[in-house]
């Protein structure tokens, strides 16, 4: 294939690149006209052109590395983790406050006398009425009306995992039916309204009478939902 001759413009660019920066020089005037040639190379425009140096231009360019491109993702991940930690801490604080409120209310009702079917401190409590009153007035939770229904409505809790505010149940009238309930405090202690002739008091799960009749612990479903978020 024949090689095409360079055009005049291409030849000029090649000369400029090869020879480096142009220098302004005085050229002799034309003998015929007394003026300098029209194609002189000391034109101010040409003198001010910068030298094209591809290697220098490439050396000065900045290519971002992979680490810098991925850097913004880390703060976002940290922010998401912080939000999750904050939510978990808030849920944990909620269940702790809820348990404290339950125990505080129950302790205020100590020495309230036992009355069969009682639902109010002004008249007295039976066991389920006492538990129901505490939950309703301390944390606004409505529980079923009797101990057997409260047992069925709760979520099972292992004895080793019991927390303040969980319910403890007993079979005091035979081995088949749930007939008594109290509110767990801590260290094996619970508060309840035990029987006629007595009042709201604290007892121990390790006491012979209650140890033999202990049927298990349950956590009211609403409390379990709050605890699960923590």
Image: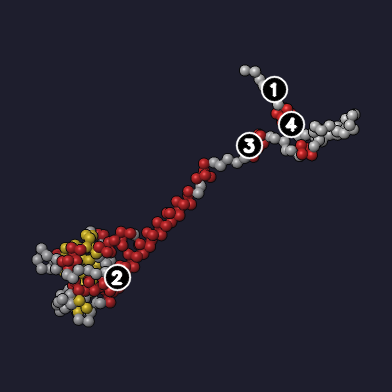
Q: On the image, numbered disc 3 is attached to which residue?
A: 58
Mark closer to the chain start, 4 or 3: 4
Q: Are marks 2 and 3 in contact (CB under 8 Å)?
A: no
Q: Which of 164 and 14 is in front in this view?
A: 14
**Tag 2 secondary structure:** helix
Please state the horizontal and vertical placement of residue 124, each as a whole percent of the image.
19, 79
Q: Is residue 18 visible?
A: no
Quadrant of the rendering where the C terminus is positioned: bottom left
**Tag 1 secondary structure:** loop
Mark closer to the chain start, 2 or 1: 1
Q: On the image, numbered disc 4 is attached to which residue?
A: 16
Mark closer to the chain start, 4 or 1: 1
Q: On the image, numbered disc 2 is attached to which residue?
A: 139
Mark 2 and mark 3: Cα distance apart in space = 70 Å
**Residue that appears at 20% across and 74% down:** 129
Which numbered marker is on residue 128?
none
Q: Nearer the viewer, residue 114 or 72?
A: 72
Residue, far left:
174
**Tag 4 secondary structure:** helix
Mark closer to the chain start, 2 or 4: 4
Q: Are marks 2 and 4 in contact (CB under 8 Å)?
A: no
Q: On the image, numbered disc 1 is attached to which residue?
A: 5
Mark 2 and mark 4: Cα distance apart in space = 89 Å
């Amino acid at each position: 294939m024949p090689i095409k001759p360079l055009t005049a413009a291409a030849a000029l660019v090649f000369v400029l690149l090869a020879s480096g920066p142009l220098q302004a020089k005085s050229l002799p005037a034309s003998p015929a006209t007394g003026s300098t040639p029209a194609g002189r190379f000391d034109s101010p425009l040409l003198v001010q052109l910068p030298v094209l140096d591809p290697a220098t231009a490439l050396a000065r360019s900045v290519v971002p590395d992979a680490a810098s491109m991925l850097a913004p993702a880390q703060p976002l991940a940290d922010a998401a983790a912080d939000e999750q930690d904050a939510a978990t801490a808030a849920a944990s604080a909620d269940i702790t406050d809820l348990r404290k409120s339950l125990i505080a209310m129950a302790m205020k009702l100590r020495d309230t006398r036992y009355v069969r079917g009682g639902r109010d401190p002004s008249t007295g409590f039976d066991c389920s009425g006492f538990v129901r009153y505490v939950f309703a007035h301390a944390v606004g939770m409505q529980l079923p009306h009797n101990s057997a229904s409260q047992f069925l409505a709760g979520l099972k809790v292992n004895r080793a995992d019991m927390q303040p505010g969980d319910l403890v149940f007993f079979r005091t009238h035979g081995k088949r039916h749930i007939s008594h309930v109290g509110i767990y405090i801590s260290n094996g202690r619970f508060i309840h309204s035990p029987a006629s002739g007595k009042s709201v008091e604290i007892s121990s799960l390790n006491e012979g009478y209650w140890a033999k009749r202990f049927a298990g612990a349950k956590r009211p479903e609403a409390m379990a939902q709050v605890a699960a978020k923590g």
